Image (cartoon, helix red, strand yellow):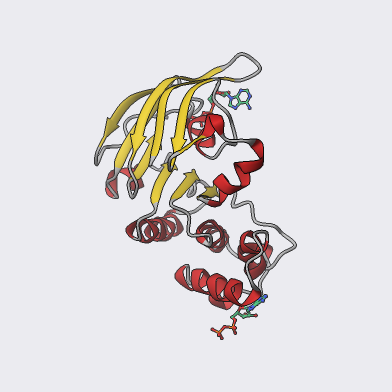
Amino acid sequence: MIEMSEVYKTYPNGVLAINGINIKINQGEFTYVVGPSGAGKSTFIKMMYREEKPTSGEIVINGVDLSKLKESKVPFLRRSIGVVFQDFKLLPKLTVFENVAFALEVIGENPRSIKKRVLDVLDLVQLKHKARAFPNELSGGEQQRVSLARSIVNNPGVMIADEPTGNLDPDTSWEIMHLFEEINNRGTTIVMATHNKEIVNTLKKRVIAIEDGKIVRDEPRGEYGIYV
Ligand code: ADP
Ligand code: ADP
């Protein structure tokens, strides 16, 4: 579960990006975060995996109060949260297999279980046959599938995605969305900031709309709304 109470965030330059947010997202929910550019969507989700800290207020992720989380424990939090970005952020010098295995190697898993787990998640995203390829040999959609595989390899309870279809064509975007649905169907909570109106209005989920750092709308099976 993700819970925010009275959360405010002012950046060092004085910009008030989050202006009093209260929200509860239950385990297993699939939630879109929508709103105009600059509304605070990225800041909202970055605070969930401690990429940004709130100026005040409380954020609790799976029972862990992030304000009380020691810096040394942040890597443990990150392991319980998969993160997917618009620009994939794969390591260019590592193969597909190695990009996905990396997260398991740093926690000292044994090589046999790493191999099994990596091939299992590559199978899920239908890229087992590209295990030896390098990211620059893959299409955008394939790279995003690798990044999804990487984000779930640790079996996280929560997945955070910031515009995961922002660099993809419509057909490829739908393929990626179906993978997110499959991951969600296995019980993983998904929080996804998106500007993809067609997807939000077709694949109906909870919609949280943010404007000027505030939640202005929160609807189960909501609509995208009117944003440019
Ligand atoms: P969105 O994701 O909805 O486009 P952001 O969370 O990126 O919104 O930005 C919210 C506000 O905070 C904007 O005014 C943006 O310019 C500002 N902002 C975002 N990141 C930073 C930062 N690192 N330093 C200063 N201001 C920032
Ligand atoms: P299968 O048992 O399904 O045939 P393989 O063991 O042949 O699977 O592996 C599938 C792909 O994963 C192959 O392309 C292989 O090169 C790659 N692979 C397997 N283990 C590793 C590893 N430890 N490091 C890098 N690539 C690996």
In this picture, is 15 found above or below 200?
A: above
Left or right of residue 20: residue 84: right
Q: Quadrant of the N terminus?
A: top left
Query: Which image quadrant for residue 10?
Result: top right
**Ligand 2, image quadrant it occupies:** bottom right
Q: Farthest right residue?
A: 93
Determine whether 213 is above or below 169 in the image.
above
Nearer to us in this view, 83 or 165: 83
Q: Is residue 41 above or below residue 73?
A: above
What residue do we see at 30% from left, 27% from top?
A: 217
Residue found at the very far top of the displayed protein: 14
Q: Is residue 98 visible?
A: yes
Q: From where the camera sits, is residue 127 visible?
A: no
Query: Horizontal and vertical percent for residue 91?
Result: 69, 57
**Point 36% across, 30% down: residue:** 23
Residue at position x 48%, y 46% from top?
161
On the image, the x and y values in percent for residue 77 come to: 55, 45
Tally the marks. Answer: 0
The residue closer to the viewer here, 31 or 212, is: 31
Corner quadrant of residue 11? top right
Q: Position of residue 127 (x, y in %)?
A: 53, 72
Q: Nearer the viewer, residue 174 or 122?
A: 122
Position of 123 with respect to 76 (left or right) is left
**Image quadrant containing the C terminus:** top left
Q: Position of residue 227 (x, y in %)?
A: 39, 29
Above-or-below relation of 65 to 84: above
